Amino acid sequence: MTQTIAPRVRTLVLLLLAATGLLFAGAGPVSAHAAVTGSAPQQGAVVDKAPTQVSLTFSEKVALSGDSLRVLDPKGKRVDRGDPANLTGTTYAVKLHGGLPDGTYTVTYQVVSEDSHPVAGAYTFSIGAPSQTTVSVSGQTAGGGVVGTLYGFGRYVSYAGFIVLVGGAAFVLACWQRGAGVRALQRLTVAGWLALTAATLGLLLLRGSYTGSGKVGDVFDLDLLGQVLQTKTGAALVSRLLLLAAAALFIAVLFGAYEKREDEEKRDLTFGLAVGGVVVSAGLAASWAMSEHASTGLQAGIAMPVDIIHLLAVAGWLGGLAALLVALYRAPADTPVDASAVRRFSRLAFGSVLALVATGIYQSWRQLGSWTAFTDTRYGQLLLVKIGLVAVLVGIAWVSRRWTGRLAEAVVVKPREESDPVVGADTEPDTDVDADTDVDADADEKEPARAGASGSGSGSASAGKGAAASGRKGAAGSDKADGESERAAQLARQQAAIDTARRKERRDADPNRFGLRRSVLAEAGVAVVLLAVTTMLTSTEPGRTEEEAKAATSASAADASSAGALTLDMSFDTGGEDGKGVVRVDLDPARVGGNEMHVYVQRPNGRAFDIPEVKVAFTLESQDIGPLPVVPDHITTGHWSASGVQIPMAGEWKVSVTVRTSDIDQTTVSKNAQIG
């Protein structure tokens, strides 16, 4: 039966890895965690006089370098001077050269948000009148490319290593102390430590390139590494490495001295290991809490301890689940995991789920801020997926709990000698060994009789012949004794192997244990995907931040509208890949006669992107005028412009925008607005 189960395990693991890969493939570049809430000049603005500086306002404090803010003229030449400076709070500015000619200028920025994630973007403004520009900002992303992929993978491995390390140790101490001597559990826990250590070192090396150039060649740049060590994230990673050294000592004691102690001595050592393990585990969890989402924004003093509890609960549940799975499949036949250990883990998992629910509700409120953010932001959508996976996991855990109850009932009902699948006992005699022993005894009894018969036939023999015969018989007896000893040892080894195989066969044939193994394997499969979604959540812009940025942008557009310009935002969905977004139409000064029109296309998260075609039409239905078509010129990524758009008379005009995202995916959206 074990041979039948093993291919299933391998197949399921491969499917889970493929699912995880698809999740990462669809994740894309890391989203911004600090959003731009304002700028001067504003996006798409046309100013009469060249400004002396360009400023950007973010939703939170950010870290800048010398090239964080750049301003490029229509030919792609830099026109900014000096390093960017912090004006007030979250507003940062860079000065410009004087005497800039008319044309369209591009502002690019790449900073690091307070929660450690890189933020990049670009927008344009014009002096005098818009113009063509050679600057392309389509690749203006943060955390992308090979380095971004490696960094994302390193984050996933670090989370997985932490969960396996902490959960495996907790399972041994709290649920199955006999597991300290099981080599498969030892290897699992040590593998978690190695994965977390290797991933932390990798993240430390990748960090400088990840938040900067994105080049693979900069990974081993010692100057960049020195800069990283001075940041909050660098300090957190170094702290994690120091705590991992303490974790190595903990593992050595748990699987070394602890396993060899007597039961009474184990009780005292268990308390000490539990206290030390909790301290080290909480410290490792704090290395994430002190540098990511929990350390910034609303109620950071409360959010960080809550985040630590959340991570520990995840490790206790999912890491313990991994340890239980290994114990069920890989524990020796003479040391099977018993029903009491599974029941103890069931209680541990239940407590972890309660902690997850409580802390998860608080984190969701803190990161989303409103019910609409569940569906209107990427963070909220991923959170809904995570909640669904947790619900599925709890359902499968309920099935596992039922199998545990049946396993416990089987132990109570059956006599101890009939409970081999649980306790690993085997009391059947081996008749083959008894038959061999009887044959050897008969041969020994017949040997003296033959010797006596021979002596009576020959009479009295000489003393020399008697001594020689006695010597040969002694040598033969010694050789025979050695052969019997070797054969007995061989038979003992064979019998031990037979006993072990028989116990394993009976253990695997137990329907309750087999059902429990299958349900726990299914739990582990869902847990792998859940961990991937959780990793994506930690690198996605919180819904509260995204909605605040949208509100600030809308307020800015309203201010522009009250000053005489008209701004219309329209959501679209063509139904194809990358078919969702928002199209914005700016009409200045929105009056009868010639007007300047700018069209911007953005993804739902506010990032500009290009589509194959944009067309605008104006219709005054009350006077049966129109539609008057306008085909704007493409300026830069997500930006189109048209000059001299004629509005023949005042009234409530219908502004229709046709967007095409592929050869076959197209839609038209419209809004009414008072012009003139």
Image (spheres, rainbow, N blue to C red):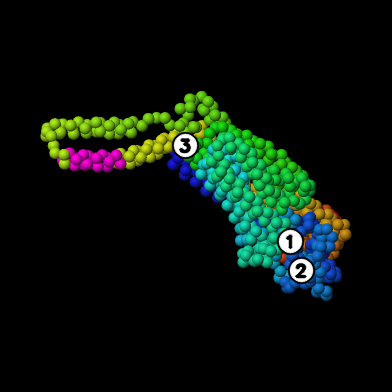
Q: Residues within 10 Å of mark 2 (few under 14, many from 20)?
A: many
Please give left or right for residue 482 compared with residue 578 in the image: left
Is residue 593 shown to the viewer in this render? yes
Using the image, tell me which numbered label, if any, was put on residue 111.
1
Question: Which residue is painted at 70% across and 49% down in the image?
Answer: 286
Helix, strand or loop for disc 1: strand
Please give left or right for residue 438 compared with residue 72 in the image: left
Q: What residue would you read off at disc 2?
A: 71
Viewer-side label of 3, 1 = 3
> Percent x, y for residue 475?
24, 42
Q: Is residue 345 magenta?
A: no
Q: Is residue 466 magenta?
A: yes
Range drawn in magenta: 465-482
Earlier along the polypeptide chain: callout 3 or callout 1? 1
Outermost right residue: 563
- Cα separation between marks 3 and 1: 58 Å
Q: What residue would you read off at disc 3?
A: 334
Q: Amino acid at mark 1?
A: Val
